[in-house]
Amino acid sequence: MKQLMRADFYRLFRSAPLLIALLVMLVGDLYASSRVDVTTENMYDLPMLCTMSAFNSYAERTNMSLNGAKNFFIKRGQLESSDAEEVTEVFRDVMPYQFRWVLASTRGMLFLPALFTAFFLLMDRQRRNARNALYVGHSRSALYISRILFLFLVCFCVSLLGILLLAGIYAGAVFTRLPALYVWSRLLLHALRDCALVAPALLLGLVLTNLFFCAAAIAAYSVFLRFIPLHPLTRFDLDIWAQGSGYVPTLLISLGILALCAVLGWVYYRSSRLD
Amino acid sequence: MSTAVLTAENLRCVSGGAPVLDGVTLALYPGHIYGLVGDPGSGKTAFLRCVAGLIPLESGSAAINGVSVAEAASRRETGMLVHEPALWNELSVPGNLEMMGRILGKPDRKRMGKLMKALEILPRQTGRRSAGSCPASVKLRLGTAMALLGSPKLLMLDNIFSGLDSDDALRMTELLVSETAEREMATLVTSPYLAALWPLATDYLFLHGGRISGKYTREELSSRLTGEPGPETLQALQEALKKEAGA
């Protein structure tokens, strides 16, 4: 299986269509990051303040007191309490919420990894490349597992890169002001959650044989994710970044969706013709 | 005689609801090149697909080195080209061999170079273009090189001579003869025409309607030829054998 994954990564970096798809994903990440509509002019009107330095300069300009700073966020519903002893420390307690807000805007990027997943599977099937692995003793199950692991790793890395970009651009202070374990565990969970949202594309890529229909189905699914606020995973956006709560349910739901899609995909793949 | 690399016993396979192989019994031994001859639809490709595990066995058995073909592990030392080469079209010719080497777990660049040279598919001969844009004959030679890359004990090639000109066919024949002898490999090559396999095979199996209708050595067939072996005499012999078998 390791051999098959190594071969897939070799192919990813040597094959022009896949490399272009990968680059489009990365550029899409950058584009989506730049689309977060935050400027120094409007940042005070937004539900969350976006940078610690912006808050500090705002507090300095308005001669905000410690209690005034705390009340500023409590009134906005972004803070329940804070043990900060200086005005500049108050923002630390708001960060998880601010972080959440910034990262919630990444959902629009899921379309590209989903399309990449379907594109990879379609290319593989149309050219019957899977046969080469079967001819030399790899089992169908090894082939399937290597495929989904490869796709998961690619989508996970792309998603994580997008999140890092967003966090770096708009909430960079969290890396120095919040505990590293807290920040990284949430970043990784966010990427995992994105992969769970992309996972249905695996099924579309396996079942649909036409790239156009497949892309249309994925676009429809992306719109559904974007505009249906009651989707079970998107609801967890509200909790992932809060201290203590939301982490485990999101982790379990994400893993559950990934496992379900992988099992359903296998049910289809095990009996599908590979020649 | 040494142990058979591939054995099939009363093999029956069904594809699309219809039997494509029925009661096939044969054994392939190392160092021999077998020609599997049969009309289109006779079950040649189906036999290879069955051994490749692409279609399940309905009844009977088939084993490679004693391990049932139903198990993927049986094919650890095989090389196959079934129906047409399954190339990674967007990769170059060496890129395809590199991919195959990685799938095998041992990208042996020396062997890749040797095979590319023997089959005249070196980058300076094919250009730097992708495999998908290469002519059919290059694709066939590349597919054969990919099948040979892992130094298999059992090599099965489907209808490879149909898209090759005489020079390419000669080079392919020379390579298969030397590889079979050097590596003590059992090689099976299919074709609808006995004449296409005559310069290559040492043993012949005739397939009709999913059944083996005859097994002959080259000497046995030579003794039945009415003249010098040429396309016409070999075609006549093939027709005669078909009639004899009641096909």
Image: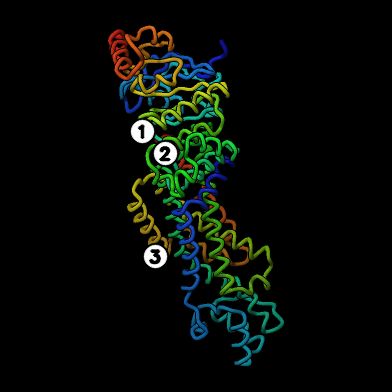
Q: Position of residue A227 (x, y in %)?
A: 39, 65
Q: Position of residue B136 (x, y in %)?
A: 37, 38
Q: Position of residue B36 (x, y in %)?
A: 40, 20
* Residue at figure coordinates x 46%, y 33% from the top left: B144
Front residue of B127 and A137 = B127
Q: Amino acid at mark 1?
A: Gly
SS of the residue under disc 3: helix
What colour scheme governs how the chains and residues are painted in the rendered image of this protein?
rainbow
Asked if labels 1 and 3 share a chain, the reply is: no
Which quarter of the rendering shows the N terminus of chain B? top right
SS of the residue under disc 2: helix
Asked whether the residues under the numbered discs 2 and 1 touch, taking CB atoms below 8 Å apart as contact, a structural biologist would say yes
Q: Is residue B77 left or right of residue B21?
A: right
The answer to whether one can see residue A14 in this image is yes
Per the model, the C-alpha gap separating discs 1 and 3 is: 54 Å
Mark in the foreground, 1 or 3: 1
The residue wearing badge 1 is: B163
Mark in the foreground, 3 or 2: 2
